[in-house]
Amino acid sequence: MDAKKNRGWIEGVVITLIGLVCLYLALTIPNNPVKRAEGFVGFMAEAKLFPLIASCVITILGIVMTGSDLVKNRKAPPFSKGELVRTLILLAATVIYVVLIHKIGFLISTFLYLGATLFYYNYKERKWYVILALTAAFTVIGAYLVPLAINLRLP
Amino acid sequence: MGILLSEWSHLPSVIGEFFSNPILILILLGGLVYGYFIGVVPGLGTTMGMALCLGIIFKMPPVYGLTLLIGILVSSLAAGGITACLANIPGTAAAAATCLDGYPLTLQGKGREAVGYSYVSSIIGTLLAAVFIFLIQPFVTKIALSFGDWEVFLFCIFGLIVCGSLTGGNLVKGWVSAMLGVMVACCGAEGIQSVMRYTFGNPYLLGGVDSTVVLIGLFGLSEVFYILRTEKVVKIEGKGSWPKVDIATFLRNKWNIIRSALAGIWVGFIPGVGEVAACWFSYDIAKRSSKHKEKFGKGSEEGVIAAETANNASTIGALIPALALGVPGSGSAALFIAAMMMIGYRPGPTLLLTSPGILCRITFLFVLGALLMLVVGFVLSRFAIYFLSIPRAILMPFVAVFCLVGAYGTTYTMFGVVLALVFGVVGLFMKIYEYPIAPMVLGILVGKIMDTSFRRAMMQYGANPMDLFRRPLGLAIIALLIVVMFFEIRRTRKSREEKAAEAAAEENK
């Protein structure tokens, strides 16, 4: 079994596990406080009905995917080491941005986030002062002028 | 027929009043420009745009308020598809289906054409629906009253069956995506007995997951993360220029337009389903009836035209029950009638009696707004189209900021921002591992309505559930469902046979 096939198999297992976790959570949903009907019809009116159905379907589809030729023969997704690093840096920057919004508000954190990301992705092609000007312009538009125009009060 | 003629008799006075008062034209133009901006910016949307103006509308005379309201509605709906075409980010939730073909068209260097198809078909949808609403409104009360929870549930099933044609070839992954969407829709205190589902003790999840925030994450942020993960520059062969409106294409698509407008009006008419379901429903119909099914999802003008015509027609269609019964068919219709009440109108069965000529005024404003939007949209789209010439490495961080500002503006909580980020990451992994996002969105939007209406129907018919199958409207929808499922199975089998034949031919080579 080559690496490509392995990945497909793992994907199916992950979906099955997600389905099982959803199923467990669905089973913990409390019953309706007021019963309008008993038996099967009563069960059909329970709040947990649709979560149960959806999680069962996800689990079954996960099992199907695990054994399916369709998944096994799929080409491995293009996710090189360099791409992984770039993605993780961007995700980390965005998470820090969200934390900063909470702590110091939109304006300064937007300036820092835009400055960092624009510099990281454009430092080879553009001069630092162009990046700085773009950062300032985008910050003013995105975090000040647009919210002002639509009467949106940002923290 | 008498009511219809009496409404028509107000037309000359409405036209006269409008053209003798330049302030009304200015207000309508202001509403169109503002609505365009609201529609183009991801995450703001029609409902939020109108909500932000309520303070101004409240202070205006009723006629001015109504004019501004309709201006915003017409324009934001038409503009919602433009960012969907140019940046794969739907400006409004109703433009989600437009991404499927609008963005591939842009990637092929046909950004101008995509924008042209999107906004002109939006305007056509608005015009057709406005005329239709005027003709049908007086006769509608009886039908709307006979639509129960069971019929709404059956209609939602329709929505989920559409998933089959939105999966881009991998049915299993499409269904996984749709079911995950249904799970997300089930979050929060459910609508009948307030039973807590998947809230994890978090008070922000009590009201469920905000679908606009989810859309911002799945379509907007995930696109930013996906594009910026690679160093290679995505080069788009388009130029910042006027949108291209090819009349011949619209003439070729005349049946597609009429079909989509009628589908949109029909879906909009059903309370609770809304314009988002309309665009997917109509997209599916267009795909099924197209001679070039293989082009759908790869840049088909038919797909863009169908989705955009339907979502506009649906929003106007949602005004039918809203005006006749005071029951809004969608979020934007709810806000529309709320604003109408605020300025002194009383939507409901007595509206035509207490405000004679109101239907005529609304129709006239929709038609005039749509015609003016042809010019306003054409001029403003020149600037929207400059998205094409901006390098993605510069544009995308800015889009990320816009998405997060939009997420905050939708919920006014930091939780909305965090949720958008979470769904952005989910969307990124879905894209990388080739899970279609569209079925998940459909699951989220239809899941909650489906759940509530089915369980409510079960409670109503608890003594004898078989009575549900004796409702004539329900039976008609079930028959339609069976026909659609039959064609879906046939289509899947056929495409599987074709793939097998292609694989066999390649092996023989």
Image (tube, rainbow, N blue to C red):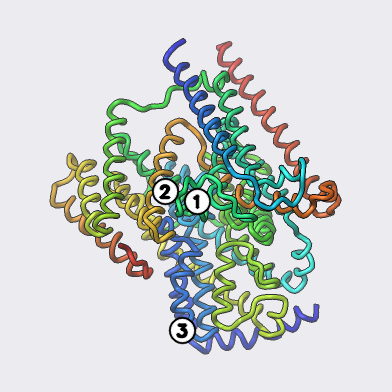
| Of the image marks 1 and 3, the number of the one nearer the N terminus | 3
Whether residue B306 is visible here, answered yes or no, is no
Mark 2 on the same chain as mark 1: yes
Using the rendered view, name the quadrant where residue B56 is placed: bottom left
Measured from the top left, where is residue B175 in percent x and y? Answer: 59, 35
| Viewer-side residue, B272 vs B267 | B272
Mark 2: which amino acid? Leu
Question: Looking at the picture, which amino acid does disc 3 mark?
Answer: Lys
Distance, label 2 to label 1, CA atoms, is 8 Å
Residue denoted by label 1: B209
Relative to B403, B146 lies left or right? right
Q: Closer to the N terminus: mark 2 or mark 3?
A: 3
Distance CA(mark 1)–CA(mark 3): 33 Å
Label 1 secondary element: loop
- Look at the picture and state if B110 lies above or below B28: above
Disc 3: CA contacts within 10 A as few (<14), some (14-19) or many (>=20): few
Residue type at mark 1? Val
The label number, if any, that marks residue B59 in the structure image: 3
Residue B226 lies, with reference to residue B15, above or below; the image says above
Quarter of the picture containing the C terminus of chain A is bottom left
| Residue drawn at the location 25% of the way across and 62% of the way down | A140
- Report helix, strand or loop for mark 2: helix
The residue identified by callout 2 is: B419
Percent position (x, y) of residue B94? 54, 55
- Tag 2 and tag 1, C-beta contact below 8 Å: yes
Q: Residue B56 versus residue B235: which sits nearer the camera?
A: B56
Q: Residue at x 30, y 35 (%)?
A: A88
- Residue located 60% across and 44% down the image: A30
Query: Dot 1 falls on which chain?
Result: B
SS class, disc 3:
loop
Question: Which residue is at 27% across, 31% downward?
Answer: A85
